[in-house]
Every structure is written in structure tokens, then in C-alpha cells.
Amino acid sequence: MNIPIESVKKELETRLPDVKLRLIRDSILIENPEDLLRVALFLKESPVFLLDYLSSVTGADYLTFLESVYHLYSMAKKQGPVVLRVRVTKNNAKIPSLAPVYRSAELQEREAFDTFGIVYEGHPDPRRLFMWEEFQGYPLRKDYEQEDADILETADIAWLEARGIKIPDEMKEKAKALQAAGQRAVAEKPEKPRN
Amino acid sequence: MAYTKNKSEVDETLRADLAKKGVIWTSLDFLYNWGRRSSIWPMQFGLACCAFEMIAAACARYDIARFGAELFRASPRQADLMIISGTVTKKMAPQVVRLFNQMPEPKYVLTMGACAISGGPFIDGYNVLRGIDRYIPVDVHLPGCPPRPEALLHGLMVLQKKIASQEIQKAAWYQKGLKREFPIPELGPNGLIPKFNPEVWQPAKRNPRKEHYGQTILVGKKQKAPDLELVVAAKSATPGAAA
């Protein structure tokens, strides 16, 4: 069963008058990320909605800003979803964590941090989820530069030579030229990212 | 797969005819290879969805036991064949190479499915290795997404053919100076270090995929995502539409 999003917005505006909200399609955008925790706590505890289940936390890159989308359901009332959005800039991508309110946010926030670099403040275990600790960059951001897997770089050459593996000269020269130019071997990318 | 024909001087049909009459005429190579090829023990090791086809091949309907390969060993020390069944992610690749190193000679590798061969549908992914043959030598490539159990049985038969064609005197694992331990790649800041082992694999000179599609990364239909803000503006402009 669906909850009409306008009624959620109206209820939120009467109970939390200082929280700025905006409707985007069938979802509510919380203008100030700081208010997210209050809104989520209210929706969870309010007897009208009883949204006790956070089904998904998603990151998204809209080029000019990053977004985090939350889908809330009510197991008690068998209804939902209510979709919340929070937007942050790339330079200051900090959103309060929902893990203290919903336990299910814990791993999904780690995933969004891993792939989009959104920092969830107050998360009990803020590590990468899928990629390894030494990995640099956030691979699902549109400006991520992926390595070209067919061209060896100086780090690879040094690693291979330390283990006594023969490397063709042209590969060595290519790696040297790349290092002289101060570049990485980056996979070819379209000029404009897909919207 | 390249395999040499059995160079035994005994004619295969003559050998079969004599066997029917109760005369066994054999060479040491033949007997030895018959024993080896009829009891290939694979490693119990699944990486992704192809593993389910491997499991199905081991069950009663397809019954890999007919080929003597039903004994899936949970330890690389007891295995002859490594079936790489599924996507090899960059995070998993070091462990796969390490397991290969731990297997005793003679050892064989069968890659199962498009992902293990080349990265498959995930070839442009940031997290998937473009084929395990970048780090270890592969004996049988088995295409499919995933290959059916019959295809796995066929791959096994091809491997048996390869084993039957080997000679004890020329077999690699009896030669001196055999280097079959491959360096284990490490997890680096942008992916694996090294990206491939040039002694095992080198990139092809031409890239047919790029020639065909033009752009390496971006293939498929270009679709613009709907502009969320505009839709809201239109809804609020026409009263009643929002309800």
C-alpha cells in the first residue's frame, strides 16, 4: 500500500516546522542534510507512519552534487515506501548516519561511502565495504578515472622486475614515457559523461 | 586448444580391435595417460554463478562421475584440475593465483564462462579482472554465460584428449628448471599490481571491440535521465495533476 507523499510532507511540516522540505516527484528532498536524523527518527516513531524498516540507502552522482536516497517502509502497517533524498556538494560530502536509528543502514552506508565517497558522520564502522582499504578514489563517481588494464605502469614494471620476470622493451618504454609525462594509464572515456 | 596428436606408433583402431579379442597391446605412455585422464580430481572451488552449472554437472542428471572427475577436493594439494567457475574480481585474483601455485604437478586449469575468460559483461568494470589468463596459463577455455553442464563435460573431454596426447619423456613437469609458480599480484591503489604477467599473457596488437564500437567504455544506447525538477514544476503548474 502506498502512502501519499503529500500527507507525509504535511505531517512533517506541522510537527517539525523548522525543517525545510521540497517535493521531487514521489519523494521528499530534505534541503539541509543536518535535519535527516530528526526526520527519520520522527517517521520511525510517529504512530501515524511507523516507518520501522529502512530498505535501501543509495548514492547517486548528479555531476553538480551527490545525492543519498532512502527508502522507508512500515512493517507494522504494511505500507510504504516513503522516499527521502539528501543532497550534498562533492567538496563537503557529509551526511549524518542513519545507523543509530536503523541498523540496516550500516552496511548500505558503507557501500555508498565505498563507491561514491559520501561520508556518513556518526557511523559505527566507517570502512570501505567492497573495495580494499588501499584503494584510492570512488569508482562510481562520474569523474573517476579508471586504469587502462592493458598498459603497464612503472609500479608494475618495478614489481615484475623485482620478481625476475622478463618484460618486452616496448612495454618498458611506454611506462617510462607515461611517467615522464606525469600521467597514469587511464582507460578511454567518453568526452561527456552520460546524464 | 592446441594439442599434439598421440605420437604412439600403435594404431588406435588396431589397439581397439585387439582389445576386443582379449589382447592388450599398450605402451607406457598410453597406460599412464589413461590412468591420469580417467581420474581428474577437480578442486572444489566456485566463484560465481557458473559454479552452479558445475554443481549441476556433478549431480545425478549430468553425472561428471562418468568421466572419473567426481571427486571434488576441498584442498588444492589434492587436486589436478582447477575449474575457474565464474567472475574473477580483482579482490579475489591473488587468492586464485595462490591456489594455483599450491596445486601439485601435473596441474590443469579450465576457465568456465565468459567472465573467467575475458571479464565477460564486466570487462569495463573497475572491479573485475579481464580474464584469469593474465596471471596463470589456461588449458581449456570454455565459453558461455554460463556454459551448460554438457559444455563442462565437453571441456573435460577436451582436457582428457590433451592429457592423452602428452608423453612422459617430454612432459613439462618432468623437465628440469620448470617454472610453474607464478607471482601473486597485489592489491594496489587503482587495481592490481601488476596488471598482467607478460610471461603468461600479453595484450593483442589490435582491439577488434574498439574498432567495431568506436568507443571502448561507452557502448549501448545513450539515454538521458529524466530531469526530476522539471517534472515537479510542471505538476505544480497544473492544479489537480499532482493529486
Image (cartoon, coloured by chain):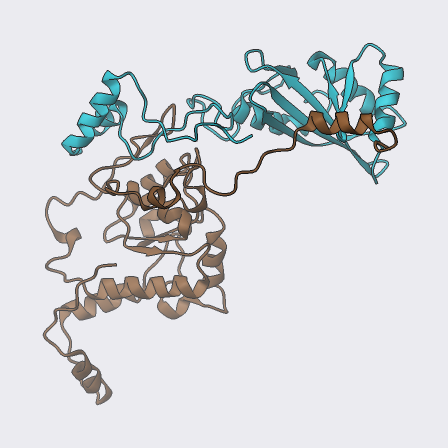
Where in the figure is residue B213, as x and y percent of width and height?
Answer: 39, 43
Question: Is residue B203 among what the camera can see?
Answer: yes
Question: Is residue A97 among what the camera can see?
Answer: no
The residue located at (28%, 50%) in the rendering is: B138
Q: Is residue B48 above or below residue A141?
A: below
Q: Quadrant of the C terminus of chain A?
A: top right
Q: Is residue B180 above or below residue B34?
A: above
Q: Quadrant of the N terminus of chain A?
A: top right
Q: Is residue B144 above or below residue B101?
A: below
Name which quarter of the figure residue A165 lies in.
top left
The residue located at (61%, 29%) in the rendering is: A108
Where in the figure is residue A82, as x and y percent of width and height?
Answer: 78, 30
Chain A visual colour: cyan
Where in the figure is residue A10, as x and y percent of width and height?
Answer: 87, 22
Q: How many marks?
A: 0
Chain in brown (letter)? B
Name which quarter of the figure residue B24 lies in.
bottom left
Extreme-top residue of the structure: A18
Where in the figure is residue B51, as x and y percent of width and height?
Answer: 47, 53
Q: Nearer the viewer, residue B183 or B68?
A: B183
The answer to whether A191 appears left or right of A121 in the picture is left
Q: Nearer the viewer, residue A141 or B168?
A: A141
